[in-house]
Amino acid sequence: MRHTIQQSDSENTLNWKIVQLIWPYLLEYKSRIVIALACLVLSKAASVYGPFLLKYIVDALSLEGVGQGRSQALVLVPVGLVLAYGFARFSMIILGEIRDTVFGRVTERAMRRVGLKVFVHVHSLDLDFHLNRRTGGLARDIERGTTGISFLMRFFVFNIAPTLIEIGLVIGLLFYNYGIAFAAITLTSVVLYILFSIVTTDWRTRFVCEANRADSAASTRAIDSLLNYETVKYFTNEGYESQLYDDALADWESARRKNRLSLLTLNSGQALIITVAMTMMMWLAAQRVTQGSMTIGDFVLINAFMMQLFMPLNFLGFVYREIKGSLANIENMFQLMDLSSKVKDVPEASELFVSQGHIQFDQVAFHYQPDREILKRISFEIKPGEKVAVVGASGAGKSTLVKLLFRFYDPTYGSISIDGQAIDRVTQHSLRAAIGIVPQDTVLFNSTIFDNIRYGKPDASDDEVHAAIRMAHLQHFIEQLPEGVDTLVGERGLKLSGGEKQRVAIARTLLKRPPVLLFDEATSSLDSKSERSILAALREISEGHTSLVIAHRLSTIVDADRIIVLDQGAIVEQGTHEQLLAESGHYAELWSAQRKQNVQ
Ligand SMILES: Nc1ncnc2c1ncn2[C@@H]1O[C@H](COP(=O)(O)OP(=O)(O)O)[C@@H](O)[C@H]1O
Ligand SMILES: [Mg+2]
């Protein structure tokens, strides 16, 4: 799923969405906004007034130079003015800092809120999205999106509008004090500058997007490769991996190069416009000073104004460029937010209420891809408290049954119900809370064994966790560990053996104690001895619970109330162990094949 950046056509809706997104965060801190705005106004006033003070100082000094008699008053005037000038500059800077500090809280809160929102959203997406996502790239997209929002908030509120106002003010003052010429030059150059910046920045946006895409791709590559560390070593493919990563980095480098060259164009153009305007104004002012229609103070004032004008203008160019970039990043993130889960709660979905645990599959058909049917209109039921086993070749669709019951996917035909409530009419949360799964491949969090087990019921007491550990026959293994239950299990639990991981998975499901239990080849990684003891424990626990057991070793399910034999997505046989053996069909064949293996 490649998120491409579409320009212009979605621009209006995007901007509106961003306003909608940012507005609530601004309202959350009204007083901070007021203080920040006050600082802004005062700092701008100080910055516009500064050059006037400078002019007075220069004029006072030149007057002093003319009149030789150094009276007290004449010395005092510049000192007062100099102090005032210093104060104005200091106020301008410090007020700006206060504004940023006060407003920082608002942006950080917005980043936190948005970050959480995206996280929750990504978690709400269906399994299919997560199987197709690229973790590294996804993380980068989100990171850039939230940073983009904070940038936008800071600069949209405090830079674009105030800078435009400041520019207007300066042009007005120039016009008022020195006539049309200066104001006209300034206005023309400002308009030219802004137009040039907008056109060039728009042209550059695609290079920025290209660089971002390359950045995400490189990140995806690196993370995928590092996650597969062991596989890389098994095949000594470090060189190959480095090559792939370097290819991705090379794309990134070349995208950045284009990005940089286009930035050079932008910056040089901007500098040219500014320099021409400044030179023209200085020349004009110098002429007027020689003609005597302006004082040296005026010359300095104009110079100071220009500095003051072009600095924020330059900044405006930077801000515009960054805002364009931020918008692209935010759009990328919004595309993620716009994805909706294929598995959704219906409006007004009720809570699943499990009284007995009667599960019914009615004509359930399913496919992952349209041209490959995985389940073919399967019907069966598990009566309250029953243990039903599903057996069949690998790829027959056994795990898919579990995924459908857990509602990771919706069937394409037919329905599944628990105690008469169709599972697609109840909330996913209540459905999943009622089901405990020991999956085929257990993945653990990179934390301690204890925490991983407690995950089954986060508010469980230590005693409850220890009881679950005993029931899953983990205590013997844990006693051998120097750090006991506080042993870290490593990334995805890779520091544990397959059987140990399965036992941790069993322990945390036992802790959850849901009314319906699903075991997907839950003991396949255990040796026969520990399997037997765990099965005894599981049998005890499933007592009175409805359970669906997918088994690899048939010896583990001979006691099932019913055995369903699945072959290529269809039920081919159904019955108790004895009945199926008597039928001498698929099951009997499988059974004798496994018996032979055991004898050997
Ligand atoms: N997310 C998926 N996308 C496409 N095909 C899938 C997906 N998950 C499983 N399959 C395919 O569906 C078939 C049944 O899978 P599964 O139910 O896991 O089989 P098993 O009976 O071994 O547990 C397999 O052939 C598998 O390749
Ligand atoms: Mg399976």
Image: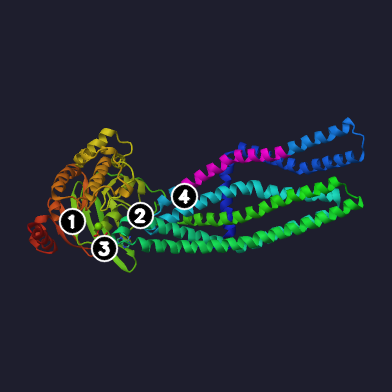
* Mark 2 or mark 4, earlier in chain: 4
Q: Can you tell me which quadrant of the image ligand 2 is in?
A: bottom left
Q: For mark 3, does the 10 Å Cα neighbourhood hold few (<14), some (14 to 19), or many (20 or more) residues? A: many
Say whether disc 3 or disc 1 marks the residue closer to the N-terminus.
3
Q: Earlier in the sequence, mark 4 or mark 1?
A: 4
What separation in Å lies between label 3 and label 1 (alpha carbons)?
A: 23 Å
Left or right: 319 in relation to 297: left
Labelled pair 4, 3 in contact (Cβ < 8 Å):
no
Q: Circle 4 sits on which residue?
A: 118
Amino acid tagged 1:
His
Residue 219 drawn at (x, y percent): 44, 57
- The region drawn magenta spans 89-117
Quadrant location of residue 586?
bottom left
Q: Amino acid at mark 2?
A: Leu
The secondary element bearing badge 4 is classed as helix
Q: Residues within 10 Å of mark 4 (few under 14, many from 20)?
A: some
Asked if residue 91 lies in the magenta stretch, the reply is: yes
x%, y% of residue 480? 21, 39
Asked whether the viewer can see residue 172, the reply is yes
Q: Does dot 2 land on a helix, a strand or a loop? A: helix
Main secondary structure type of the part rendered in magenta: helix
Q: Identify the residue at the far bottom of this view.
A: 371
Q: Residue at x 48, y 58 (%)?
A: 215
The relative height of residue 56 versus residue 438 in the rendered view (above or below) is above
Number of numbered discs on residues: 4
Tag 2 and tag 3, C-beta contact below 8 Å: no
Q: Which mark is residue 227?
A: 2
- In the picture of the structure, the residue carrying the numbered disc 3 is 377
| Residue 552, numbered label | 1
* Circle 1 or circle 2, nearest the eye: 2
Of the numbered discs 2 and 3, the one sitting upstream in the chain is 2
